[in-house]
Image (cartoon, helix red, strand yellow):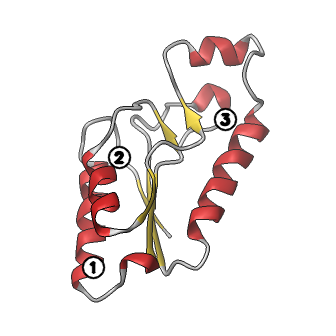
């Protein structure tokens, strides 16, 4: 498992993930041996890496179980979301599920390192 993190949003984490997957394919890995997951995100829009994975047949979960939508932190603090433990367990299960029978799993980190820190779910 490879975890790709950055020091802020829009620094190329997903581009690095895309490059890694493409390189692994060129090195002889088969699509069914690879997976991509973004277990936590702030963006629910379709990303290029999702389209690439779908096109070449790589298992892909581009929008993980944790989505930091606008107002998420406030809802968390008010007790209107799952607990930190539940959120982390959901992310762990998603990674474990997509990792089954894979040789390499690329895990894409979320935005700024502090995103999710109040909830205990940051990078």
| Image position of 53 with respect to 63: above or below | below
Q: Sequence order check: which comes first, mark 2 or mark 3?
A: 2
Q: Is 117 displayed left or right of 43 in the figure?
A: right
SS for callout 2: loop
Spatial CA distance of label 2 from label 3 is: 18 Å
Proximity of marks 1 and 3: CB atoms separated by less than 8 Å: no
Image point (23%, 64%), residue name: 19
Say which mark, if any, is on residue 25: 1
Say which mark, if any, is on residue 51: none
Direction bottom: furthest residue: 28
| Image position of 101 with respect to 7: above or below | below
| Image position of 17 with respect to 79: above or below | below
Proximity of marks 1 and 2: CB atoms separated by less than 8 Å: no
Q: Nearer the viewer, mark 1 or mark 3?
A: 1
SS for callout 1: helix
Q: Nearer the viewer, mark 1 or mark 2?
A: 1
Front residue of 59 and 117: 59
Image point (64%, 48%), residue name: 91
Q: Sequence order check: which comes first, mark 1 or mark 3?
A: 1
| Image position of 80 with respect to 65: above or below | above
- The part of the image, by quadrant, that contains residue 7 is top left
Q: Sequence order check: which comes first, mark 1 or mark 2?
A: 2
Which residue is identified by label 2? 6
Spatial CA distance of label 1 from label 3 is: 35 Å
Q: Residue 48: x and y, percent?
A: 25, 48
SS for callout 3: loop
Image point (62%, 38%), residue name: 121
Q: Residue 2: x and y, percent?
A: 45, 67
Spatial CA distance of label 1 from label 2 is: 24 Å
Which residue is identified by label 3? 120
The residue carrying pointer 3 sits among few (fewer than 14), some (14 to 19) or many (20 or more) residues within 10 Å by Cα, namely some
């Amino acid at each position: 498992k490879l975890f790709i993190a950055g020091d802020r949003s829009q620094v190329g984490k997903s581009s690095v993930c895309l490059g890694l997957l493409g390189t692994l394919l060129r090195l002889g890995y088969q699509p069914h041996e690879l997976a991509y997951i973004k277990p936590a995100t702030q963006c629910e829009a379709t990303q290029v890496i999702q389209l690439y994975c779908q096109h070449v047949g790589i298992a892909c979960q581009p929008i993980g179980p944790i989505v930091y939508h606008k107002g998420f932190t406030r809802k968390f603090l008010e007790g209107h979301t799952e607990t930190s433990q539940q959120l982390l367990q959901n992310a762990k299960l998603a990674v474990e599920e997509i990792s089954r029978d894979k040789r390499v799993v690329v895990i894409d980190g979320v935005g700024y390192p502090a995103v999710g820190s109040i909830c205990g779910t940051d990078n």
